[in-house]
Image: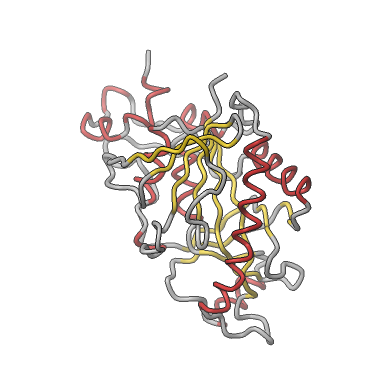
Amino acid sequence: MSKAIIGIIGGSGVYHLPGLENLREERITTPWGDPSDILRLGHVGATEVVFLARHGRGHVLSPSGINYRANIYALKSLGVTDIVSVSACGSFKQELEPGLFVLVDQFVDRTYARQSSFFGNGCVAHVSMAHPIAPGLQARIAAAAEAEGIAHVKGGTYVTMEGPQFSSQAESLSYKALGYDVIGMTAMPEAKLAREAEISYATIAMVTDFDCWHPDHDHVDVATVLKTVAANADRAAQLLARLLRDFPAEHEPCPIGSDRALDAALITPPEARDPALLKKLDAIMKRVSQP
């Protein structure tokens, strides 16, 4: 087994990780461009951690303007084995009220303006996204939330919209009718790229508001969202601290094989692969390209 290195991707309101010791910062340029911010490396207890602010410190990047490929590649190049994504979201269900954390296990991708794969012409790969969340990692997050007394729900479907505008009421009612649980703007293509990079991935979706389907909350605005985001950020820091303190030293093999996703995904034979693309894929394909 390999050493566990945990990547934390902080969303709205989560721009740093309290309690990160032996802190050092590293600026990385990837073959896919620059990640959202400087990466902050350190330890929480004995666990090695890499933190990245998804929107950049100061929240300067729109959901559509984030370089998701550079973010995931940078984490992979630093040896990250597991990613915990923290995202703000709206709720489609009365019982999923603001302040609750939803540990989602499914995604619906409604984005359309983002680069969603490292692979393409010259090296084609089709990874499975049937089960996008690593169940072992999700279980550890749930256990940490339980230990800290943080209100959470395990399981749920997160629909990712393009944004940056909030939903129309027609969209919100449609998603609710389809049985989705929460809506946000950043889980995709992040989860897809993590799977291609063979990194175990799980999301903490922090409910900030009822989406505009709700008759008493039919107007979502930034001020309302930010008020809940501030409270959620404190609980997220508490949850992450517990998770990281209790994390095993060795990476636990993923029961659904998310950390070996390329074994059955590459379709272009080695002799036909584009050398220029392979060079850009170096950190992603290192395990499967080694003799």
- Residue 283 image offset from top left, x and y in percent: 36, 30
Query: Compared with residue 255, is residue 207 higher up or lower down, i.e. above or below?
Result: below
- Residue 152 image offset from top left, x and y in percent: 73, 56
Position of the C terminus by quadrant: top left
Q: Say which residue appears at 71% left-offset and 53% top-offset.
A: 155
Q: Say which residue appears at 61% left-offset and 33% top-offset.
A: 45
Position of the N terminus by quadrant: top right
Q: Quadrant of residue 227?
A: bottom right
Q: Say which residue appears at 65% left-offset and 33% top-offset.
A: 247
Q: Nearer the viewer, residue 217 or 176?
A: 217
Q: Say which residue appears at 54% left-offset and 49% top-offset.
A: 85
Q: Quadrant of residue 56?
A: bottom left
Q: How does the figure colour the protein chain or chains?
A: secondary structure
In this rendering, would 129 be left or right of 137?
left
In this rendering, would 207 be left or right of 261?
right
Query: Compared with residue 95, is residue 26 higher up or lower down, i.e. above or below?
Result: above
Query: Compared with residue 235, is residue 196 higher up or lower down, i.e. above or below?
Result: above
Residue 202 makes an appearance in the image: yes
Residue 130 makes an appearance in the image: no
